[in-house]
Each structure stands twice: as structure tokens, then as C-alpha cells.
């Protein structure tokens, strides 16, 4: 059983559309990270959120951390083919060195 | 700036052969180091992590072992590979503080035949 549940597992949209990816858990996290991974490469850190209710924006990407620090979402506005990839959320429980990863959401943006 | 290297990039090995994957980090001291395995298109499974030289924590009992002979070097090994050891292996580092984000290497694609 995954500590972090991501949904949907797959998402295919047309260029210009918006999309949202969800990351949910019954556990409380001291911080949560989002990564994007392209085939054959390592994941690249996009953002870290640490405060309940926090919203961070990175160009067309908006990240939100739930008030209770148990869930997060990633929203992409006007998606582009370059946004295609595997999006992974990962959480850190208090006093721990380890990240717990979700199973990932594969996003495909069609031109 | 910090960089992380992994080699080899790809590896094809017969069942029963030994394995050694190497990971090195530059530009930082006392990093926490991690080995993950990833199935195709899926999340990451933590295999080992280390908070210092000679200190290894194993997360999943299996056919693999890890060692940290130097501060910025992390090695993943096996004496005899199994078919199920095939996968994409990723090394990562984080600053030596609790709960920090991790930075990943380029990965090694291992195929066991």
C-alpha cells in the first residue's frame, strides 16, 4: 500500500488545456515535494511546500499544500507538449530522512 | 554547485553474475545518500540510505547490498543477480538535515537476462 496516493494514474490532454494532479495521504507530512521525470532520466525537483494551506506558483504550474498537510495538488494552466512527463509527489514525515513517493501520474500533452 | 554522477548508464548482465553500480556526489559535504529502484513509469522504491560513511540502512530485504566507503561515494552491489533485479536504479543525495528535498542522478538501466 502506497503511503501517498496519486490520481489520476494517466492523463492525456490537448495543448492549451488545463490539468490537475492530486496527491493524497492519511499521514501528516512536514514537507511535500513535486518532481517531474522524463523517460530514461532522474526526477527533477519542481517545488517543496512546507506550510499547511501554502500555494506556490512556478510559471504555469500552481502547487497547493492542504491545510492539514496530508494532501497536495499540482495544477498546470495552458499545458504545452514540454509539460509531458511523469509527475511524482513525495512526502517527508517528521524527524525522518526518507521520502515516501507516490506511484506517479503520467501526463501527455498532445500538440 | 552540486552534481551527482552515476555509472554505468546502461548495463546488461546474465543471471547469477555480480553487480556494482557507483554513485558519486560533488560540491557538498556530509550528504545523505539514497538508492532507489523504479519500475517502468511508476514511483520509486527506496532500497538503501546512508547518513554517513559506513552507515547503511536497508529498507527492503533482497538480493542487493550497499556500501559507503567515502563521504560522497555510494555503491550498490549484488553477488548474484536475479531476473527480478532488472529495473531503473537511481541514486540521490540530500543535505545532511532531516526532511530535505532530494536531488537525483541520471540513473542506471539494468537488464538481467
Image: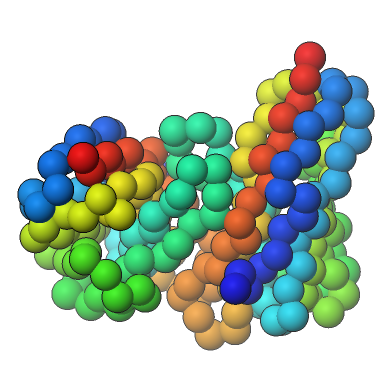
Tell me, yes or no, if residue A62 can be seen here.
yes
Q: In which quarter of the image is residue B50?
A: bottom left
Q: Quadrant of residue B66?
A: bottom left
Indicate whether B44 appears above or below A40: below
Tell me the residue at 9%/60% (across/down): B79
Tally the marks.
Answer: 0
Q: Which of these two is toward me, A91 or B89?
A: B89
Q: Which of these two is toward me, A62 or A22?
A: A22
Q: Which quarter of the rendering shows the N terminus of chain A? A: bottom right
Tell me the residue at 72%/42% (across/down): A10
Give percent across and percent down for residue A3. 63, 73
Q: Which of these two is toward me, B80 or A80?
A: B80
Tell me, yes or no, if residue B31 can be seen here.
no
Give percent across and percent down for residue A28. 71, 81
Q: Which quarter of the rendering shows the C terminus of chain A? A: top right
User: In this rendering, would A58 be left or right of B98?
Assistant: right
Tell me the residue at 77%/55% (across/down): A7
User: In this rendering, would A41 be left or right of B110?
Assistant: right
Q: Residue furthest bottom?
A: A95
User: In this rendering, would A43 be left or right of B31?
Assistant: right
Give percent across and percent down for residue B68. 18, 65
Give percent across and percent down for residue A43. 52, 44
Amino acid at each position: 500500500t502506497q503511503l501517498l496516493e496519486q490520481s489520476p494514474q494517466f492523463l492525456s490532454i490537448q495543448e492549451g488545456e488545463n490539468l490537475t494532479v492530486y496527491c493524497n495521504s492519511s499521514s501528516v507530512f512536514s514537507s511535500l515535494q513535486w518532481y517531474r521525470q522524463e523517460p530514461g532520466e532522474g526526477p527533477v525537483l519542481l517545488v517543496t511546500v512546507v506550510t499547511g494551506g501554502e500555494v506556490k506558483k512556478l510559471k504555469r504550474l500552481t502547487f497547493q499544500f492542504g491545510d492539514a498537510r496530508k494532501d497536495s495538488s499540482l495544477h498546470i494552466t495552458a499545458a504545452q507538449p514540454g509539460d509531458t512527463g511523469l509527475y511524482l509527489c513525495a512526502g517527508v514525515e517528521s524527524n525522518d530522512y526518507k521520502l515516501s513517493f507516490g506511484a506517479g501520474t503520467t501526463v501527455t500533452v498532445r500538440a | 554547485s552540486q552534481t551527482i554522477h552515476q555509472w554505468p548508464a546502461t548495463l546488461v548482465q546474465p543471471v547469477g553474475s555480480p553487480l556494482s553500480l557507483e554513485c558519486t556526489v560533488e560540491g557538498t559535504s556530509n550528504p545523505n545518500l539514497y538508492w532507489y529502484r523504479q519500475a517502468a513509469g511508476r514511483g520509486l522504491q527506496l532500497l538503501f540510505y546512508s547518513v554517513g560513511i559506513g552507515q547503511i540502512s536497508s529498507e527492503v530485504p533482497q538480493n542487493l547490498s550497499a556500501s559507503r566507503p567515502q563521504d560522497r561515494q555510494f555503491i550498490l552491489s549484488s553477488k548474484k543477480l536475479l531476473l527480478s533485479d532488472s529495473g531503473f536504479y537511481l541514486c540521490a543525495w540530500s543535505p545532511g538535515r532531516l526532511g530535505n528535498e532530494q536531488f537525483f542522478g541520471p540513473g542506471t538501466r539494468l537488464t538481467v537476462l
